[in-house]
Amino acid sequence: MAQASPSSPEDSDALNRTDAQYDDDQSSLRSDEQAGVKNIEAISQTWTRWSLISAYLGAAVIKPPMAKIANAFGRLEAFSISVFLYVIGYIQMAGSNNVKTFASAQIFYSAGNTGLQILQQIFIADTSDLLNRALWSSLPDIPFLITVVQNDSVTAAGHITQTFTFTSTVSSIVTGLFIKYTHHYKYFITAGAAIYLMGAGLMICYRTQASSTAQIVGTQIALGIGGGMVNVPAQLGVQASVSHGEVAAATAIFLTIVEIGGAVGSAISGAVWTANLPKKLSLYLPADAQGDATMIFGNITLAQSYPVGGPERIAIDRSYQETMNILLIIAACLSVPLLPLSLIMKNYKLDQVSQALWPGSEVIADEFRRWTRKSEETSSARVKGKDRLLL
C-alpha cells in the first residue's frame, strides 16, 4: 500500500507516532464497545480473505449431504446430527483459547447451523401444500421484525442496512399471502427482480455524502421489497418442479447456489475494497495523515474519529464514497440478469400441481381411495341387507 514520505519535521512526527500513543487512541475510541464485539473483531483480523471464502463455501456445501441424510435415514436423524454438530461447535467455542481452536469450532457450528436451516425448509415443505408454502417459509424470519435497535453512533450504519432485512422479511410474508390467493409465483419474481434492479440503481444515485438518511433508507426499502419478492417465490418454483421425494435435494441445491453466490459476492466486494480503498486513502489524505492510511483502512472506528469537515475526514469520506460507487455499479450490473431469467421460469399454477411422494404414487393413492370407497359401500350394503332380513 503506497504511503507518502515525510516532507517536514512535522510530517515525520506524525508518521512516527509511538505504539503507546496509538494504543491510547484506540482504547479511548473503543471504550464503549462490548467485550463480545471486541473479541470477535480481534479474531476476525486473523482471517484472510480466502479463509473466509472457504468458510462460506464450507457452510454452503453441507446442505446437499444433510438433505441426503434426511431422505435416506429420516428427518429426525438428520435433525439430531445437526443439533449435535451445533452443540459441539458451541462447546468448542466456549473452551477455545486460541484462534485455531475457535476456527475449528466454527466448522462444527456452521455445519450444524446450516443443517438446521435446510431441515427447517424441508420440514415446512413436508407439512404444507404449495399454496401455503411461501407464507410458511417466510415465518422463520419473523424474529428479525422485533430486533431491538440501539442508538450507538458506531453501529448506526449497521442499523440502516438492517432495513433491508426487515423489509425483505415483510415483503416475503406479504408475497406469500398473494401467492396463496393467486396460485401463481412467477409474476412476483419478475416484479421483484425489476424492483430490486431499480433499488440497485437508486443506491448509485442516493448512497452518497450529500444524501439524507431518508434517501439511504429508501434505497434499502426498495432493495428489501424486491429481494423478498424474489427469494421465497424462487424457492417455491424449484420445489413445485419436482416430486415430494425430490423436494429435499432440490431445496438443498437451490440454497447451496444462493450460498455460493453470496460467497462469490463477498470475494468480489472484498477484492474491490482492498484494491481501491487503501490507494485512494493514500492519494487523498493530507501529507501529515498519509502515514495512517493503513490503520484507517483497517479500522472504521479510527476513520470516524476524525472531525467532520476536517481535511482528513473529507479525504476519508471521498475515498469510501468512490470505492462504494464501484461496488454499487458492479452490483447493479450483476442484478440485470435477474429480469430475463425470471421470464424464462416455468409458470406452474400451484393449485393444479400435485406434489406426490414419488413419481406415480398419486395414481396408487387414487386407486387406494377408490378401493376404500368401494369397501365402505360394500360394508354398507351388507349392513342394509342384514337389516332387511331382521325385518
Image (spheres, rainbow, N blue to C red):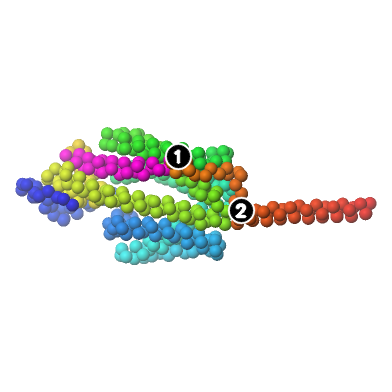
Residue 37 highlighted magenta (yes or no): no
Residue type beneath disc 2: Ala
Horizontal side of 365 relative to 155 (left or right) equals right
* Residue sitting nearer the eye, 301 or 318: 318
Horizontal side of 229 relative to 300 (left or right) equals right
Which residue position is annotated with label 1? Answer: 192
The residue lying at 57 percent from left, 41 percent from top is 183
Name, please, the residue furthest toward the right: 391
What is the quadrant of residue 96 in the picture?
A: bottom left
Which residue position is annotated with label 2? Answer: 356
Secondary structure beneath disc 1? helix
Report whether residue 94 is seen. no
Q: x, y percentage for residue 87?
A: 44, 63
Residue type beneath disc 1: Gly
The residue lying at 24 percent from left, 50 percent from top is 275
Q: x, y percentage for residue 138?
A: 50, 46
In this picture, which residue range is highlighted in magenta?
311-339
Q: For label 2, count other residues whose C-alpha is less than 10 Å away and answer few (under 14), some (14-19) or many (20+).
A: some
- Mark drawn on residue 107: none
Q: x, y percentage for residue 368?
A: 71, 55
Q: For label 1, count other residues whose C-alpha is less than 10 Å away and answer few (under 14), some (14-19) or many (20+).
A: many
Residue 262 in the image: above or below residue 88: above
The residue lying at 27 percent from left, 34 percent from top is 210
What is the quadrant of residue 372 in the picture?
A: bottom right
Report whether residue 63 is seen. yes
